[in-house]
Amino acid sequence: MKKNNLIYFCLIYFIYAFHCQAQLGQTPEMLLQTIEENNWEYEKGKIDGLQFIEVLIPKYEESIGNYTRNTFMVFKELDVIRCSVYIITNPMVLTNKMVKDFNERFVKVDYMQWKDYEEHTIYDMEIADGNCITTVYYDFKN
């Protein structure tokens, strides 16, 4: 699986900036069970001593047809090892649809950034290398 340098930069930044909580707090075993039940292609390994799982999820969107969503999840040890950040890569043509969905579901707190106050989760979106990259992490401030 091809790894995007921008994804790694964001990943390393958020790993050290944030900890794991609640909805992001699934264990690798919990996520692997879902991945294997759906027969998705995945790779697991370590970056800077932290476990990761990268999964390719086949998707269909009427406007573009079949595509593969790449989701990169990193795990950090707190009480147990749990997911602390995940990065989702979608084709850039889905950006407007995703922005519309985020505007309907979450509070926009900055340019290309939304917050789910109920779940204390931040969604950062950016466009890079022809992809729409969404980074999701827990917000400890509020």
Image (cartoon, rainbow, N blue to C red):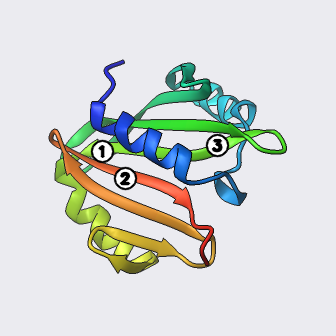
Identified by mark 2, the residue type is Thr
Residue 33 visible at all: yes
Residue 140 location, quadrant: bottom right
Residue picked out by circle 3: 83
Residue 44 shown left or right of residue 96 in the figure: right
What's the mark number on residue 134? 2
Q: Which secondary structure lies at badge 1?
A: strand
Disc 3 to disc 2, C-alpha distance: 16 Å
Q: Measure the C-alpha gap from mark 1 to mark 2.
A: 8 Å
Residue at 57%, 21% in the rendered image = 46
Please state which amino acid type lies under the numbered disc 1. Asn
Quadrant housing the N terminus? top left
Q: Position of residue 86 (x, y in %)?
A: 50, 45
Above or below, comparing residue 92 to residue 106 in the picture:
above
The reply to whether dot 3 and dot 1 touch (C-beta < 8 Å) is: no
Between 41 and 45, the residue placed more toward the observer is 45
> How far from the left and from the top, in percent, is residue 134?
37, 52
Name which residue lies at 66% across and 29% down: 32
Label 3 Cα neighbours within 10 Å, binned few <14 / some 14-19 / many ≥20: many
What is the number of the mark on residue 90? 1
The mark that comes first in sequence, 3 or 2, is 3
Q: Earlier in the sequence, mark 3 or mark 1?
A: 3
